[in-house]
Image (tube, grey):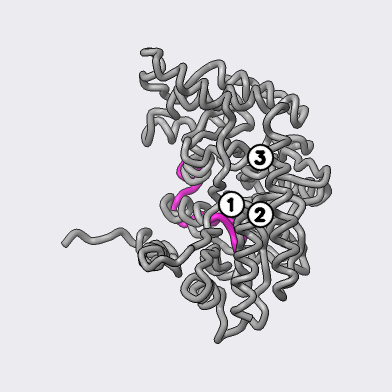
Amino acid sequence: MPRLAERFAAFPKYPLADVPEIKRKLKADGVDVIDLGAGDADLPPPPAAVAALQTSASVTEMSRYPFQLGLPSFRAAVASWMEKRFEVRLDPFAEILPLIGSKEGIAHVAFAFLDPGDVTIVPDPGYQCYVGGTLLAGGVPHLMPLREPDDFLVPLQDIPADVARRARILYLNYPNNPTTATAPRLYLEDVVHWCREHDVLLVYDNAYSELAFDGYRPPSILEVEGAREVALEFHSMSKTYNMTGWRMGWAAGAAHLVSALSRVKTFVDTGASLLVQAAAQAALAAYDDWVPENIERFRERRDAAAAALRSAGFDVTVPRATMYLWVPIPGAGPRLTSEVFARRALTEAGVVLMPGSALGAGGEGYFRLALTQPRQRLVEAARRLSRLL
């Protein structure tokens, strides 16, 4: 039998791999399952994006290979949006790269910057493609726990000196999935300074930059002085525009960093669909008219879910951003792990949650609830979860 690679064996196991099958059986038995596990909202994408996709599908040229250049007008639209939103000016053809969703770009960037044995600094808990991309490229992930006393920020002062010497990439994600934490400007300045001092690439995952509430406006890392020398920022159409399945995003940064990622991608894909790029361009153009109302829906869901969970006996911090609630499990410990709690939530209450440990050992003791269902369903989920306490 063919032998699996050592890097494959190093992949962390998903603790609830059997959830889809359990969910299927529960539904077959007539159980009303409320799925709040994945960050995949039930809301529709912008009508302008749908119309642009339909129109483009009838244009023969839009069915051709996009290659890494992609749709020039989409690149221009991204550059215009970045300047308007963050006051960051970018060359659309040298400092922006269309991606098949930000996840693939984040995973592939490690191939350009890691040699076997090089270290990456990974937030724990965190998006698992940080670890996956590192392992696939032959690197070694060094996990940095995100703790509430540190406001769930990667504690730069706690990075061991030998790790700092060997590190090639630091992954950051603020607003943060799963903890919902946001990063102060002063902290981001410290991060940029640290990366410049140690010659480390900062991979800044900004997928939730627009899912923010109560007047908060998350920044771009490229706003920080000196960041362009060391940072690649990744954006996604998935969360802001309810376009998770469309697979569209982009990377932004200095030309030499962007071109390195582009070169890797020439060997693994032929670019994001021109049809989807045209749709994404239309969505960006509809930002002012469409996004605020969509964000308001998430805010209403956030407030309803947080209030209902508090009434149910959970300690909930209302987040300033993202589409999640990060909730401590009452009585968590060796006998009540996050996986045990999530499994009970599904089998006893018909509610799908993400156990904190599924996003890294640092997430133990928490569960993540996605605001992906209408308010009344979120309230009902909280009512059911109260039975577990």
**Dot 3: what SS?**
loop
Q: Which amino acid does label 1 sit on?
A: Thr
Looking at the rendered image, the disc whose residue lies closer to the viewer, 3 or 2, is 2
Looking at the rendered image, the disc whose residue lies closer to the viewer, 2 or 1, is 2
Label 3 vs label 2: CA separation? Answer: 41 Å
Q: What residue is shown with label 1?
A: 372
252 and 31: which one is in front? 31
Q: Give the range drawn in magenta.
A: 109-127
Label located before the other in sequence (3 or 2): 3
Q: What residue is shown with label 3?
A: 230
Q: Quadrant of residue 269?
A: top left
In the image: residue 183, left or right of residue 15:
right
Q: Could you tell me which residue is drawn at 53 percent across and 61 percent down?
A: 34
**Dot 2: what SS?**
helix
Residue 64 place in picture, x, y as percent: 36, 19
As drawn, which residue projects farthest toward the front? Answer: 30
Q: Which amino acid does label 2 sit on?
A: Arg
Residue 351 place in picture, x, y as percent: 53, 66
Whether the magenta-drawn stretch holds residue 114 is answered as yes
